[in-house]
Amino acid sequence: MFIDYVEIEVSAGNGGHGCIAFHTEKFIPKGGPDGGDGGHGGNVVAVADAQLTTLLDFRYRRKYKAENGQPGSGGLKTGKSGKNTVLRLPVGTLIKDLETGEVLYDLDRAEAEFIIARGGRGGHGNAYYKSPTNQAPRKAQDGFPGESRRVSLELKLLADVGLVGQPNAGKSTILSSFSAARPKIADYPFTTLTPNLGIVKLRDYKSFVMADIPGLIEGASEGKGLGHQFLRHIQRTALIVYVIDVNEPDIAGAKEILESELAGFDAALAERPSLVVITKVDTVGESDLKAVSKKLPGDYIYLSAVTRQGANDFLEAIESKLDQQRA
């Protein structure tokens, strides 16, 4: 199951208390204070794991606690520090503080780490308080409490190219044709219920990651349809590919709807580099295709993911756009 948003509570460990103790040894009746410090509390740490693609594990468990530090003991022995609790999250997870709305960290690369809640420091033992004027202190410090906070985990897929289109426009067919991904494909709307990723290979050992999100309908940015749940996954893409069925009665109007929905969700998406691909060209005759192309801008790409018609133009256009972005 694909889960891309959860809210959890995290609590770091408390620091261990300092110890009040005095050195006792034969023939040394007044050995002085030797109470050790308490151990530090464990942290709650987030780590980006490239093998994970969903936040499913966090849907069923919402509270995470690190170990407390152990108290100090005599002989100047420091208490054992508490173990960290490690949360392994998919690459692309955004960590936000639910109280303030602040973005705490973006796990945008594999093995990136962030301490969500820091453990409390251990308290000092009485040996720490020894001074020329107080040779036998009888006080120790309590351990400090660990941090606690409520956070949201929001997964945004990391992809170079995002396929955006209305339901049943042919996005999943493109992804399955040009990559090893195998999304569900059927001849009815809303076949795609979760985002899918695939790696597309180019010449000269180059490749890029392509994402297919559920189809968008008018009003998606306001919560209509299914695609609005996954619009966040387009925010990280370097290139947006608008996918429109050649059989669409108003192709220009369909493109305007898609652009409007993306801009309504995030105004910055309106400035993102893009391509327009007219799909399923194998389903119409040559004369009909010419009639369609006369009404549209010359930079539109015509593609059949089934017969591979226009495949070279499609890949070359994407490669050119991505090279410009990387430059």
Image: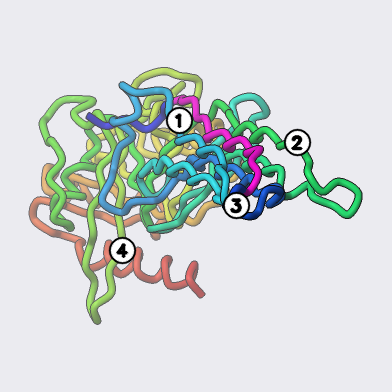
The residue wearing badge 1 is 65
**Residue 140 coordinates in the image, percent (x, y):** 71, 37
Percent position of residue 246, x then y: 24, 41
Q: Distance between the residues labelled 3 and 1?
A: 28 Å
Which image quadrant for residue 248? top left
Magenta stretch, residue numbers: 7-23
> Are the residues tagged 3 and 1 within 8 Å (C-beta)?
no
Q: What residue type is labelled 4?
A: Phe
Question: Identity of the amino acid at label 3?
Answer: Leu
Mark 1 Cα-neighbour bin, 10 Å: few <14, some 14–19, many ≥20 = some
Check the image and report above or below for 87 versus 175. above
Q: Which residue, given by chain and number where applicable, does mark 4 sit on?
A: 208
Residue 93 horizontal side relative to residue 188, left or right: right
Q: In the rendered structure, which amino acid carries the disc numbered 2?
A: Arg
In primary-sequence order, the first of circles 3 and 1 is 1
At 88% from the left edge and 54% from the top edge, which residue is drawn? Answer: 132
Could you tell me how far apart the alpha carbons at marks 4 and 1 are, in whole angstroms? 39 Å
Task: State the separation of the CA atoms marked 4 and 3.
Answer: 58 Å
